Image (spheres, helix red, strand yellow):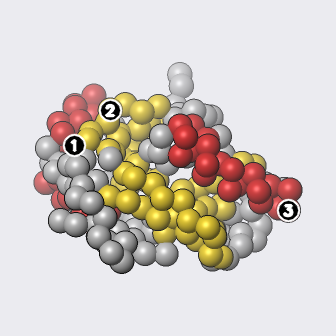
Amino acid sequence: MSPEPHYFFALWPSADQAQALAGRALLQNGRMGIRVSAPEDCHLTLAFLGALDAAQRERVLSLAGRIRAQGFTLRLDRLGGFPRSRILCLAPSRVPERLLTLVDRLGDALRDEGCAARPLPVFRPHLTLARGVSPPPGPLPVGPIEWHVRDFCLACSRPGPPYEIVARWKLSPTAPDLPGGEEGD
């Protein structure tokens, strides 16, 4: 019997964006002897749900379809990591308010439906680029990658790659960028 899949909400970059992100990890590979993540597995976790039975999964799919949030631009400009988990990641130096709003709305909807995500001590958005980094660098400023986030997804993991995207939901279109990097409302 195979292990149960674990579900999570995430932002998933396009194939082109994932290749650019993976390139950042490859630049570090020769210096650190790390296991670079496959570009197609590159994602930013919004909420981890764990194992879900069929009824819970249907409730989660339904509630996600009711989430209303706007798209945003995520500027990934810090290379760093987490020492305990030994990962190398890219992160934003400034977290867009619209990303925090999306995470809050997902968390509220999950709690209202009795499908609460596993609590995270603090939401620290990041994309894992590689594993086995000891010790991880940083945080170090790097040339930014602009990620125009236009949707979010429910994904599941099973032992070994790749992840499976179960469903995607579009975010509302955004207004043009305003001076200072903040997008309009």
Q: Nearer the viewer, residue 108 or 148?
A: 148
Up-down: is 81 above or below 59? below
Camera-nearest label, 3 or 1: 3
Residue at 43% from the left image edge and 75% from the top image edge: 94
Q: How far apart are marks 3 and 2 (CA)?
A: 37 Å
Identify residue for label 1: 64
* Sequence order check, earlier mark of 1 and 2: 1
Left or right: 64 as drawn, with respect to 39: left
Identify residue for label 3: 31
Camera-nearest label, 3 or 2: 3
- Neighbor class of circle 2 (other Cα within 10 Å; few <14, some 14-19, many 20+) is few
Which amino acid does the dot numbered 2 rest on? Ala
Image quadrant where residue 183 sits: bottom left
Q: What element carries label 2?
A: strand
- Neighbor class of circle 3 (other Cα within 10 Å; few <14, some 14-19, many 20+) is few
Which amino acid does the dot numbered 1 rest on? Ala
Residue 6 point in image, percent of width and height: 44, 40
Identify residue for label 2: 167
- Neighbor class of circle 1 (other Cα within 10 Å; few <14, some 14-19, many 20+) is many
Residue 10 visible to an observer of this rendering: yes
Residue 101 point in image, percent of width and height: 24, 64
Left or right: 40 as drawn, with respect to 94: right
Residue at 47% from the left image edge and 31% from the top image edge: 164
Residue 177 point in image, percent of width and height: 31, 64
Q: Are marks 1 and 2 in contact (CB under 8 Å)?
A: yes
Which amino acid does the dot numbered 3 rest on? Arg
Residue 111 visible to an observer of this rendering: no
Q: Is mark 3 on a helix, strand or loop?
A: helix
Left or right: 113 as drawn, with respect to 40: left
